[in-house]
Amino acid sequence: MKGLLHKASTAGERLEMIYLSNKGEITQRIIKVKKVGEDYFRAYCYTRNQIRTFSMSNILSIGPVRKHHKHLRKGA
């Protein structure tokens, strides 16, 4: 996971993350990683529109932002 975070930070890529907050809330966020530490990382959170600190142990899923395509169906 740290490798993905470092790579995204260096490339300036956005990531899509499912995160468990300290309050037990599960949220889906789009982030841009700024700095990676040992157990935490700092990222701009597009959901909250601010820089946030995230615990790596609270990440449920993380990866590149998926492109959403609209598929046209014939006859629809």
Image (spheres, rainbow, N blue to C red):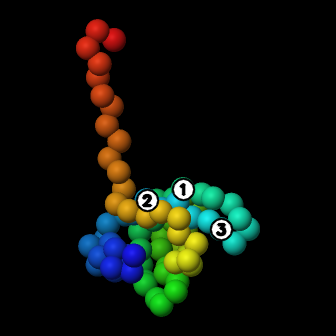
SS at badge 1: strand
**Amino acid of disc 1:** Gln
Question: Residue 34 location, x and y as percent?
Answer: 42, 78
Secondary element type, mark 3: loop
Q: CA distance from mark 1 to mark 3?
A: 11 Å
- Asked whether the viewer can see residue 31, the reply is yes
Residue for point 73% across, 68% down: 23
Q: Report the number of discs.
A: 3
Mark 2 highlights which residue?
16
Q: Which mark is residue 28?
A: 1
Q: For the C terminus, give its image quadrant.
A: top left
Left or right of residue 64: residue 54: right
Amino acid type of the residue that numbered disc 3 sits on in the rendered structure:
Ser
Q: Are marks 2 and 3 in contact (CB under 8 Å)?
A: no
Q: Is residue 45 above or below residue 35?
A: above
Residue 13 or 28: which is nearer the viewer? Answer: 28
- Taking the image as shown, residue 25 lies to the left or right of residue 28, namely right
Residue 72, given in percent of the width and then of the height, sits at 29, 23
Mark 1 touches mark 2? (CB < 8 Å): yes
* Of callouts 1 and 3, the N-terminal one: 3
Q: Earlier in the sequence, mark 2 or mark 3?
A: 2
Q: Are marks 1 and 3 in contact (CB under 8 Å)?
A: no
- Residue 21 numbered mark, or none: 3
Which label number is shown at residue 1? none
How many residues crowd around disc 2 within 10 Å: few (fewer than 14), some, or many (20 or more)?
Answer: some
Residue 53 appears anywhere in the view: no
Q: Quadrant of residue 75?
A: top left
Question: Mark 2 belongs to which amino acid?
Answer: Glu
Mark 1 and mark 2 lie on one chain; the one further toward the N terminus is: 2
Quadrant assignment, res 25: bottom right
Query: Where the N terminus falls, by quadrant?
Result: bottom left
